[in-house]
Image (cartoon, rainbow, N blue to C red):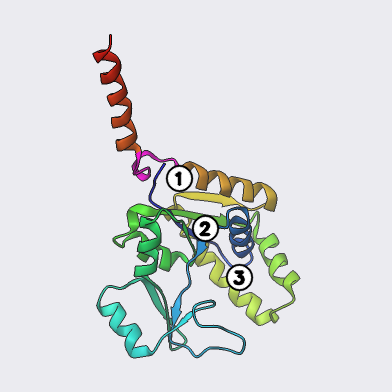
Amino acid sequence: MARRGLLIILSSPSGAGKSTLARRLMEWDPTIRFSVSATTRAPREGEVDGREYFFTRRDDFENMIAQGEMLEHAEVFGNFYGSPKAPVDAALQEGRDMLFDIDWQGGQQVRNSTLGKDVVSIFVLPPSIAELDARLRMRGQDSDDVIDGRMRKSRDEISHWAEYDYVLINDDLDATEAALRGIVQSERLRRERQTGLNEFVRGLNREFDTRAAHS
């Protein structure tokens, strides 16, 4: 059955498991594509244009904003980051699902865009603040000051949970992944997303007419 694709927004405070869930979701269904953002910052060693980011000149990025060609964007430490609209729109029309790993501000912009009707937004909560702190420290990647900064930011991020369609409490990664899969499967079956339904039902009615004509 033909359908429009989903625009899946996955948000959470740092350490709640969003990136792991995003990776697992794409491993479960490789047809789900990760939305590659554009940025005006310079590529770092090993980064490839179109894989980690679309590396874009600042004036080109600003022109895309002015022309309404960005689904969402933000300026962070002097560099722009954002999601180009054209590849996402094309994927949705072809029935392919796009996954966005963005914060609540980016999610809000996407929901308010012309593609808002295709959005399925999911917020991932930690089981407790103590567990969130422990997960950040377990990574061993950041200093105490950085972790404290992430924890302060988490409170603001969590305050936006009610803006999302679904909220998952990630106290068990496997169970949360299963719930995430269930959301995607259910949303794919929504009547308004199954673009082939009208023709299918017309075919059923033609069968009724044929039966009636021969009875």
Q: Residues within 10 Å of mark 3 (few under 14, many from 20)?
A: some
Q: Residues within 10 Å of mark 1 (few under 14, many from 20)?
A: some
SS assignment at label 2: loop
Marks 3/1: CA distance?
A: 35 Å
Work out whether residue 204 or residue 143 is closer to the camera in this orientation and state it.
204
- In the rendered view of the protein, which quadrant contains the C terminus? top left
The label nearer to you, 3 versus 2, is 2
Marks 1/2: CA distance?
A: 12 Å
Q: Is residue 107 above or below residue 50?
A: above
Residue 55 coordinates in the image, percent (x, y): 46, 85
Residue depicted at x 47% and y 88%:
41
Q: Amino acid at mark 2?
A: Ile
Residue 176 coordinates in the image, percent (x, y): 63, 49
Provide the residue designation for mark 3.
Answer: 151
Q: Amino acid at mark 3?
A: Met
- In the rendered view of the protein, which quadrant contains the N terminus? top left
The label nearer to you, 3 versus 1, is 1
Q: Is residue 192 magenta?
A: yes
Residue 64 coordinates in the image, percent (x, y): 30, 79
Residue depicted at x 62% and y 86%:
46
User: In the image, 145: left or right of 152?
Assistant: right
Residue depicted at x 42% and y 55%:
163
Q: Amino acid at mark 1?
A: Arg
Q: Residues within 10 Å of mark 2 (few under 14, many from 20)?
A: many
Provide the residue designation for mark 2.
Answer: 32
Q: What is the span of residues highlighted in magenta in the rendered image? A: 189-196
Provide the residue designation for mark 1.
Answer: 188
Residue 95 coordinates in the image, percent (x, y): 41, 53
Badge number at residue 70: none
Q: Is residue 172 visible?
A: no
